[in-house]
Amino acid sequence: MKRPVALFAVVLALGAIIFAPRAGAQAQDARQEGPTEIEKCQTISQPGSYKLVHDITFTGTTGACLLITADFVTIDLAGFTISGPGLPTITTAILGPSASNLQGIAVRNGSISNFTVGVGLGSADGSIVEGLRIFGGNCPCLVGIAANGIVKGNTVLDFRGEGEGTGIDAAGTVTGNYVARSQLAGMQIGQGSTVIGNTSMNNDGPLGGIVVSCPSNVTDNTAVNNAGGNLVLNGNGCNNTNNVAP
């Protein structure tokens, strides 16, 4: 009765020896497949996941800190900050050139300050920009976020230039964002969008706090104390419900 048990124990031991190296290789492969670390400003030319590992500062006078030239790139700022040089330069923190029509770009979870453009992802659909805190401040500030896709849970403050400055310029699903103190418009939203639960206030530009091209779904937003009008719906066919925009 004891012989089969002993034989079974030997088989288990041999199996552990045979498979242990492969398990170690799989663990190593998993580590190698983690996000690529970003330690400085650079061009991102390959698809994949990228992650900041500390604050970085762009010291150039033109161009972008992170220039994206590939589809299907995810950038996680991991709570860190990308800082720009401020006046008098024309710079972008994270740029996907408009002519490239990139697809599947995601940027999330961190802070950006002192850039002309915070996140500029061109006109391609399918972008995700979420959980960012973007501050204009000391710059010729044009736009905090420009993207088509999902723009969610961002805070954009103090985008002011010489007659310019828009907090968010987007189309798609725009939800849960807070924008204040822009010089031209708080938010400009393209036709066919879903605009839900945003707050836009104290923007002193002529266009308005939340400016939407119709038809779009515009629900549960708050727009107050904006010089050019609080909620401005351009065209016909917008679903305008439960908004606070006196």
Image (cartoon, rainbow, N blue to C red):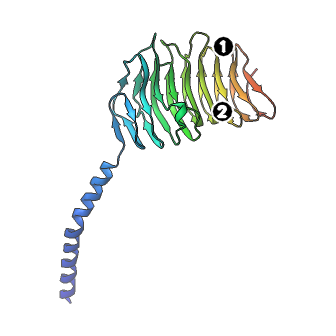
Instruction: Where is residue 195? Give x, y as percent.
Output: 68, 34
Label 2 sits on what residue type?
Answer: Gly
Mark 1–mark 2 distance (CA, rounded to whole Å): 21 Å
Give the image quarter of residue 59. Answer: top left
| Residue at the limit of the structure toward the right, as seen here | 236
How far across and down, in percent of the image, does residue 42 sit?
37, 30
Secondary structure state at the residue bearing disc 1: loop
Looking at the image, is 230 positioned above or below residue 149? Answer: above
Residue 49 or residue 18, whichever sits in front = 49
Q: Residues within 10 Å of mark 2 (few under 14, many from 20)?
A: some
For the N terminus, which image quadrant? Answer: bottom left
Q: Residue at the location (70% across, 32% down)?
A: 220
- The one nearer the camera, 19 or 100, is 100
Res 179 quadrant in image: top right
Side of 127 where 194 appears, left or right: right
Q: Nearer the viewer, mark 1 or mark 2?
A: 1
Disc assigned to residue 197: 2
Residue type, mark 1 in image: Gly
> Measuring 50% from the left and 38% from the top, which residue is drawn there?
106
Residue 205: numbered disc: 1
Using the image, tell me which numbered label, if any, was put on residue 192: none
Whether residue 201 appears in this view of the structure is no
